[in-house]
Structure formats: structure tokens, C-alpha cells
Amino acid sequence: MWKQPLLAVLLLVAATSSSAFSQPDSLKQVRTYPIEFFDAKGQKAAIAQLAWQVEQLEATRQRLRQNLGHVDEMFWKLNDKQSALRDRISGPWQFVSPEVRSQLAGRCAEQLLELQLEAASLQSKEELQDAAKIGTADEKAELELVAQELKLQLEAAFHERSLLIQKVKRKSEQVNAGFSPEEELTELELQLTQIDPLIKQLELKLKSIMAKTEKGTAHQLQEKLLMMSVKEKTIIARQKALQSFLEELAGAASQEQEIRRLEREQDLLFEKQSRLAERIGEIEMEMYESRALLELYESRAKAGASKSNSDNDTSAEETE
């Protein structure tokens, strides 16, 4: 056991004596070997390098702390923006999830489409107004002529629909066989979907005219016009209410998306904060080690200088 301390002392003495006038080549060498490894000039250079490293580490730490302060400031600014956006989601929407709001928006759009179709069926109002101006004597004959014209139009529409159905069937077979492009089939299907509302509109007009032909009085036509006017106003009011509701939903959805974007930015800033804090901790640990090593080197260098002066005085006295 006593050989190990003795071996360490012998190695230190050998290293000191063999490198008596050496200079430090790098900061790594300064941190690896004891101060006694270098001569007096080398010791000063080693201490200067350590002092320079401490200064550089301190400057780096200050810069990183400033960066961390800027990141913290940005983080809390984003947090304030999120709070402001959440406050703007007013009313009950702040308690409704985005999924439910999306479902409500879809239902509103469907109801708006239904109202548009219902409003389109009221276009027979012009024909009813013309019929109301006809005198009582000629009213029935005029309505019958209108009904006959509507029947002809309806018959032509049904015939066209039948032809389109046959075309769609043949085109579908051709597309499946690879003889025709799918776009032609899509065009025919679109025409078929467009003719159905026309048939429904003609049927409604014919039904209305037939009812008035049976009743045969201008007074009943006036009542029908009044009812249609009320219905039209009701449809318009419902459309406005649904449109306003949709705008509120769209505004809440837009603000929710902005909040999600800010949250993602905050997550990135939080990661940056963590990395900066970790790096600052590493720098401070390295500073602590370098300062401790610097103090040790300075104390050893002073002790070595004092010992050298004492040896010189002793040698001078012996010479005298």
C-alpha cells in the first residue's frame, strides 16, 4: 500500500524535472497537468489562459442569459395574446368544443340550402299575381290555359328526364367497359340532378293553378298571394338568422385556430428555454471548475515563487 503514494510522488517529480522549461501548448494541457509541470514563464501563461477562459465563459453566460430573457418575454407575450383571443370567444362558444361547432356549422349550411330550394318554389308568385288581375268572368278560362301550358312544360321535362336516365345508363356501361371517359358520365348526372328541381317547381305551379281553377275566384288568389308573401318574409328572416349564426361559428373557429398556432409557438419557445437553461448550467459548472483551478494555480505559483526566493536567499548566505 505504501508503494502507491510513493509512486505518485516519483511520477510528479519526474514529470516536473523532465519538463522543467516547458510552455503550455493548449488550454486542454493547462487543465490536464499540474502547475508544477511548467516553468515560471509557462505557469504565468497557464494562469493567463485560465483567466481568459473564465472571462469568455462569463461573457457567454451573460449572452445566454440575455437570450433567455428575450425568449421569456416572447413566451409571455404569446400567453397574453392567447388570453385575449379566449376572451373574444364570447357567449356560450367558449364552452363548446371545436368538433361540436363544426357539426353545427354543417347543419346550418344544410338548412340554408333547404331554405333556398323552398324560396325557389315561391317563384310562381308572379303567375299568381297575373291571374289575380284577371276578371272573375275570364279568370277560370285563363287559368285553364296557364294550366295547359304548365302540363305541356311538365310533360316535356319528364320526357327529357327519361332520355337523360337512359343516357346515363348507357354512358355508365360505356365507362365501366372503358369506352368513354368518366367526365362525360359526370356531366350527364349533373344535368339529371338539375332537371329534378325544375320538375318539382312545375308540379307546384300546376297544383297551385289547378286549385285556383277549381275555386275560380280572385279573392282566393289574393289570399294565396298574401300567404306566399308571409312565407317569403319568414324564409328571408330565417336565412338571415342562420347566416349570422354561421358567421359567429366561423369567427370562433378562426380564433380557435389562432390559439392552437400560438400554443405551438409557445411549445417551441419552451423547448428553447429548456435548452438555454441547460446550457447556462453547463457554462456555470465549467466556470466554477475553471475558477477553482485558477485559484489553485495562483496559490501554487505564489508558493513556488516564495520557495524559490527562499532557496536563493539560503544559497546566497551559504556563498558568503
Image: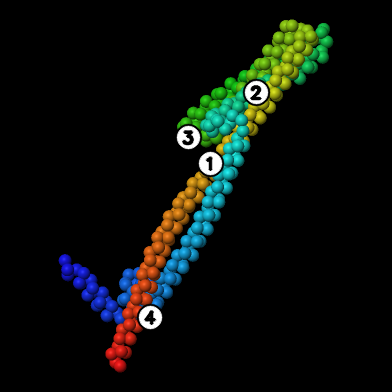
The amino acid on which the numbered mark 3 sits, given as a three-letter code, is Gly
- Camera-side mark, 1 or 4: 4
Question: Mark 1 highlights which residue?
Answer: 260
Q: Which mark is residue 41?
A: 4
| Cα–Cα gap, marks 1 and 4 | 62 Å
Q: Which mark is residue 206?
A: none
Provide residue 27's location: percent of width, then percent of height.
38, 71
**What residue lies at 17% left-to-right and 70% top-to-bottom?**
3
- Camera-side mark, 1 or 2: 1
User: Going from the N terminus, do you reach mark 1 or mark 2 first?
Assistant: 2
Question: Mark 3 highlights which residue?
Answer: 178
Q: What element carries label 2?
A: helix
Q: What element carries label 1?
A: helix
**What residue lies at 60% left-to-right and 37% top-to-bottom?**
87
| Cα–Cα gap, marks 1 and 2 | 35 Å
The chosen color scheme is rainbow
| Cα–Cα gap, marks 3 and 2 | 40 Å
Q: Tags 4 and 2 in contact by the CB under 8 Å rule?
A: no
